[in-house]
Image: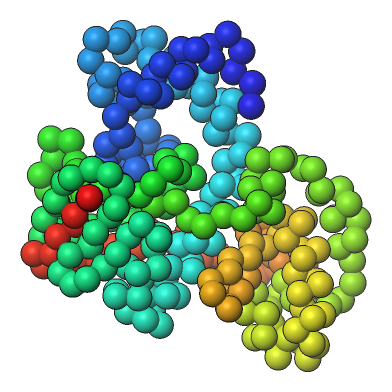
Amino acid sequence: MQVGHRAPAIESVAHALQPSAEMFRTPVSAFDPEMAASYLPGKPAASVSAILRRFHDSGVAPYRQAVSNFLEADRASRGNIMLGHGVDGFLRSLHPLISWEPPVLEVSNGSDRTVLIDDRGLLFSPSLFYFDRPDVFAPHNDEASPPVLVYTPPITVEAANRLWNRDEHKERALAALVGRTRSKLLGALSGSSTTTELGRRLGVSAASVSQHTGVLREAGLITTHRRQNTVRHSLTPLGVALVNRLETAGRPGATNAGPATTPTTQPQNDLVKAS
């Protein structure tokens, strides 16, 4: 990431800027740097906006699709956990520093705050930029909106390399992306599936599926998320586009499923305690 002579100014703003709930629940398309500048009293709004735009252009925009794919995979995984293990299982899966002992959700991040969760609920937001520890943010002058719990999804060295080293392996991976089995595998991923499920559908061994998913993952066509002993694979937007092209003649009027939404829960009168 190259930010040039603005690096000291960006670092100064990063240290001074206090995150808020609005920053994590505002869609990227609707985000206005002027809003962030309002949280930095004493600094000229125009200057802060220019700095934030410079950082976005250098540190966010080039990696936006890869980051979006990674976070969507995490949301899908959390959704599956909630379906299989309920709210308790979902809350306990979030982060090693987050513990759930009803009715208290404790975030061990060094602060000493307690947030009451009422009928507004609690919004969960995965983030790769607020990465050092999970935290809870209350709305800024907006009592009707829910607080936001921000956590960092688990990330391996391999996944980090795919996120931040753009196109490093793409040519090699795409050159290897040939053959009927991989096309069938992509077509079988209408939703997230485990290695075993894919092997059963395709009539091949789990080892063969792992080999093919490795190539597809390197090519940016699928994402893979591991939780304990289970590995789940999902199509990326690029993978969805390729599957649509592979389908003969296409299907006029067909639409793809929208992006996964951030999980929310609405426990009544529970507590989120940051300690």
Classify 222 as above or below 2. below
* Residue 12 percent coordinates (x, y): 41, 16
Q: Nearer the viewer, residue 71 or 31?
A: 71
Classify 65 as above or below 273. above
* Image point (24%, 10%), residue name: 42
* Image point (59%, 25%), residue name: 58
* Image point (40%, 24%), residue name: 14
* Image point (87%, 76%), residue name: 180
- Tell me: 183 left or right of 172: left
Classify 34 as above or below 23. above
- Tell me: 91 left or right of 121: right
- Tell me: 161 left or right of 263: right
Classify 265 as above or below 197. above
* Residue 200 percent coordinates (x, y): 70, 91
Q: Nearer the viewer, residue 119 or 113?
A: 113
Q: Kindly indicate the quadrant of the structure image that contains residue 60.
A: top right
Q: How many marks?
A: 0
The quarter of the image holding the N terminus is top right
